[in-house]
Amino acid sequence: MKNFIKVMKALSDPNRVKIIKMLQQRENMCVCEMRAILNLAQPTVSNHLKILEGAGLIVFEKEKLWVNYRLHPAGESLYSAAMLAQLENWLNETPEITEIHRLLPTINRNDICKL
């Protein structure tokens, strides 16, 4: 039951659901790209990512100067895999998610990230 509760708590925040929906549209994203779309402070986005990672919903990989986040390939648990599969079809018509889908193609890490 512990893993189930962890996944449900991770998905109980609208910004964390938005992060999942972003990663369903774009395989890899860095914190600055997500921050630009969510209009949140970098530490806030990083905290959301830590919670999603702890629930087995996302993973990260370092690539030179970037830390790329992506959906967990198969979900860490039965619950995370099931929720990722369901979220693929849910909420796509809501105004918040359609706005994210509209903005994603305009976000370029080289333009917004200061390295």
Image: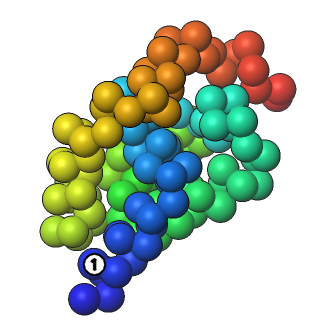
**Residue at label 1?**
4
Query: Residue at the bottom extreme?
Result: 1
Q: Which residue is drawn at 36% across and 58% down?
A: 57
The image quadrant of residue 8 is: bottom left
Residue occupying the point 16% across, 68% down: 78
Is there any visible trace of residue 53 in the rendered image? no
Residue 44, image x, y percentages: 72, 55
Q: In this view, does 76 lie to the left or right of 34?
A: left
In the displayed structure, does residue 100 sit left or right of residue 64?
A: left
Q: Residues within 10 Å of mark 1 (few under 14, many from 20)?
A: some
Q: Please, is residue 10 above or below residue 6 in the view?
A: above
Residue 28 spot, x, y in % from top left: 46, 32
Element class at badge 1: helix
Q: Where is residue 9 in the image (x, y as percent from the top left)?
A: 43, 73
The C terminus, quarter of image: top right
Residue 93 percent across, percent down from the top left: 32, 28
Question: Mark 1 is on which residue type?
Answer: Phe
